[in-house]
Amino acid sequence: MRILLVEDDRRVAGALSSALHRRGYDVEHAATVAAALSAAPCDLVLLDLTLPDGDGTDLCRELRRRSSQLGIIAVTARGEERDRVLGLRIGADDYVVKPFSMVELQARIEAVLRRASHATPHRSLIEVGRIRVDVSARTVAVAGEPVSLTRKEFDVLLSLARQPGVAVPRDRILLDAWGTTFADRHTVEVHVGSLRGKLGDPRLVETVRGVGYRLRAE
């Protein structure tokens, strides 16, 4: 998952970027409004409201105008109630006041990403090669033959099937299937192993070294 960190304090940005990298996030740092507006697409923005070339509240409004699904968390020293209310009214999904702990920030990131994922419209029927996933009925068939999966196996497959042919990071799978990235990554490996066996062809779910897994789009 890709995070855009908008923070003008280089020391704070460096420490926060390192902490997020250790948790498996891909982080791009922008120190100004201009840099943030020209940054690559991301899943979530951590936004300081005090920036050298403009007001972070205006940037928040613009980011929200561009995307209703983008996760935005204001991370700022402005802790007054009026500042919190304004931040939420202009489009931020959450508001974190400095100083904060990484445990708290991690939990807030996961909560915002979960809400964004649930708010995104998804197809009720997904077909990837020989695999057919009925999201509403929570059933799976391979080449027309039904396959019985546990709840978590289905959730792991669904996470991969929604992005066929794309390398899905382990943390994304954990968030989709378990609602957190704190879980042991070995958990994903175990469920992928059992999923491969039940799908009948281990090659359907490929391991992408250093990233996660990919469902082959045959």
Image (spheres, helix red, strand yellow):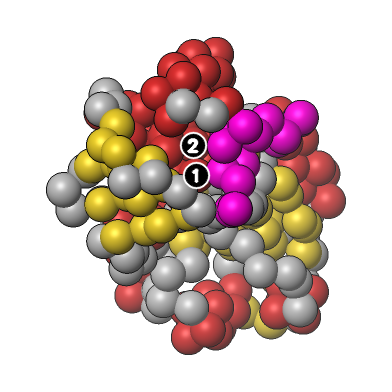
Number of dots carrying numbers: 2
When the figure is inspected, residue 36 is found, relative to residue 29, above or below; the finding is: below
Residue 85 visible in the current orientation: no
What residue sits 42% from the left and 38% below the top? 157
What x and y, as percent, mark residue 42? 62, 62
Residue in the foreground of this view, choosing between 123 and 51: 123
Report if residue 2 lies within the magenta region.
no
- From the viewer's perspective, tell me whether residue 8 is left or right of residue 106: right
Amino acid at dot 2: Ile
> In this figure, which residue is indicated by the disc labeled 1?
160
Query: In which quadrant of the rendered view does residue 104 lie?
Result: top left
Residue at 36% from the left image edge and 28% from the top image edge: 153
- Which span is picked out in magenta? 203-218
- Quadrant housing residue 194: top left
Dot 2 surroundings within 10 Å: few (below 14), some, or many (20 or more)?
Answer: many
Read off the residue under disc 2.
173
* Residue situated in front as seen by the camera: 16 or 208: 208
Residue type at tag 1: Leu
* Residue 193 visible here: yes
Report the residue that reaches farthest toward the front: 144
Q: Identify which residue, 17 or 163, lies in the foreground.
A: 163
Task: Indicate the secondary structure of the residue bearing disc 2.
Answer: helix
Q: Position of residue 116 (x, y in %)?
A: 38, 59
Marks 1/2 in contact by CB < 8 Å: the verdict is: yes
Task: Give x and y (percent) for residue 146.
Answer: 26, 37
